[in-house]
Amino acid sequence: MLLSPRNFKYKKQQKGKSFNKITGSLTSGLTKLKFGSVGLRALTAGRLTAKQINAVRQSINKRIKKLGRLKVNIFPHTPISKKPIEVRMGKGKGNVDHYVFKVKAGFILYEVETSFISIAIKALKGGQIRLPLKTKIIFN
């Protein structure tokens, strides 16, 4: 089951500013570990789809098993619409295709609470592979 919001006042949204321009300061958003001892911080800005967020979550949970707890600090709220293939231009905006989370540089995406730091690092390295952003593992 993919992550998606329950309901909106308006189903479709505009995309917003270009992600090449969204650098953001490290003061905006979650920048310090609150729940865990090891975390995964985004170094670049971009978009994470619900599929990518779920894939990383599954990968980390598979490695830490019952030796720790995972906290996911992100949720895809922004709908992305797409017109069907081979449809002519015009006739309004397309239907919602998927949901994304807009990541700013410096935001902490995942946190792992465990006393086994080496296992948490291996789990987060496995999760880094599945992300389209540059990330860094940080410690408390």
Image (cartoon, rainbow, N blue to C red):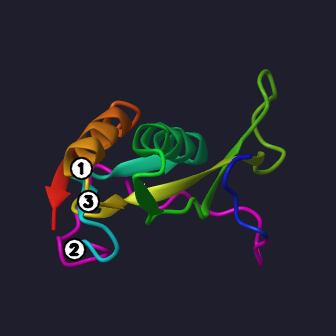
On the image, numbered disc 1 is attached to which residue? Answer: 44
Secondary structure found at label 2:
loop
Kindly indicate the quadrant of the structure image that contains residue 10: bottom right
Residue 115: give its label: 3
Q: Is residue 21 magenta?
A: yes
Nearer to us: label 3 or label 2: 3
Determine which quarter of the picture holds residue 105. bottom left
Q: Is any part of residue 133 visible from this angle?
A: no
Q: Nearer the viewer, residue 139 or 97?
A: 139
Crowding around mark 1 (Cα neighbors within 10 Å: few <14, some 14 to 19, many 20+) is some
The answer to which of marks 3 and 2 sits earlier in the sequence is: 2
Q: Closer to the observer: label 3 or label 1? A: 3
Q: Which residues are magenta?
A: 7-30
Q: Is residue 11 magenta?
A: yes
The x, y position of residue 80, in whole percent, is 63, 50
Q: Residues at badges 3 and 2 in contact (C-beta under 8 Å)?
A: no
Q: Earlier in the sequence, mark 3 or mark 1?
A: 1
Q: Which of the image's four quarters has the C terminus?
A: bottom left
Residue 28 seen by the camera: yes
User: Label 2 belongs to which residue?
Assistant: 32
Looking at the picture, tell me which residue is in the foreground, 123 or 116. 116
Amino acid type, label 2 = Lys
Disc 2 crowd rating (10 Å Cα; few below 14, some 14-19, many 20+) is some
